[in-house]
Image (cartoon, coloured by chain):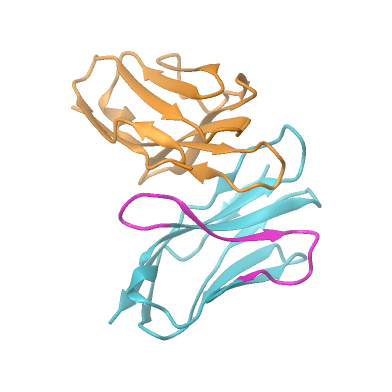
Chain colours: A cyan, B orange
Amino acid sequence: AQTVTQSQPEMSVQEAETVTLSCTYDTSESDYYLFWYKQPPSRQMILVIRQEAYKQQNATENRFSVNFQKAAKSFSLKISDSQLGDAAMYFCAYRVDQTGANNLFFGTGTRLTVIP
Amino acid sequence: DAGVIQSPRHEVTEMGQEVTLRCKPISGHNSLFWYRQTMMRGLELLIYFNNNVPIDDSGMPEDRFSAKMPNASFSTLKIQPSEPRDSAVYFCASTPGLTGEKLFFGSGTQLSVL
């Protein structure tokens, strides 16, 4: 069974500083995708970044980057130069790369507070 | 593109009443998902459709929940009768259907059952 674990229920960071959110997952599959979604107080789920498991290179999107360790089944999110607008719940998610197996499994989330 | 559209945004009802949540996926997307979000259980998949056909409804809590997708542009999630423990945010999401594609989420429906 696929599971996604986020061990940090809450994190805080000073504005302009860097923070890393942790995520581990359990799977027997070799081909899959990993995602980080952001959920601000508006409730909207917004994709932050996506990583293909077959790619060794870590994905980056502006101030957001991941540290993908396939052997360790770890997928952490680094936010650089944190901004007030980064305050939100962050969810790590996993999706197997298999036709018909479309479910996206979510972790329990990490609430990020950005301190001015 | 208007994105995934859900209605209503908020719903308050009394225990025992029927509740219908609505979703319009992004045009051209073949897969549609219904998720429920609560503090205790996080985001749970209730059911998903591919090409309007239910593929996996194992997450539907019980017979009080039902979902339909009569066409590619509309889906409903119905709870009858509703109970206080059904109070949650219900999200609809769609995707083009290709593996690995991200899910596009609607804004959710906040359901409160009194």
What's the residue at 79%, 69% (across, down)?
Answer: A56
Residue A61's spot in the image, x, y percent?
58, 70
- Is residue B87 depicted above or below A83 in this figure? above
- How many marks do you count on the picture? 0
Residue in the foreground of this view, choosing between B29 and B22: B29
Which quadrant would the C terminus of chain B be assigned to in this image? top left
What's the residue at 52%, 44% (across, down)?
Answer: B104
Q: Range of the magenta residues?
A: A39-60
- Is residue A46 depicted above or below A104 in this figure? below
Picture quadrant where residue B64 is located: top left
- Answer whether residue A48 is magenta in the image: yes
- Is residue A82 depicted above or below A28 in this figure? below
- Answer whether residue B72 is magenta in the image: no
Q: Residue furthest front?
A: B1
Residue A67's spot in the image, x, y percent?
65, 73
Residue A65's spot in the image, x, y percent?
59, 73
What's the residue at 43%, 28% (across, down)?
Answer: B23
Residue B67's spot in the image, x, y percent?
48, 19
Residue in the foreground of this view, choosing between B104 and B85: B104
Is residue B90 left or right of B114 when viewed as pictured?
A: right
What's the residue at 55%, 33% (across, down)?
Answer: B27
Is residue B111 left or right of B74 when viewed as pictured?
A: left
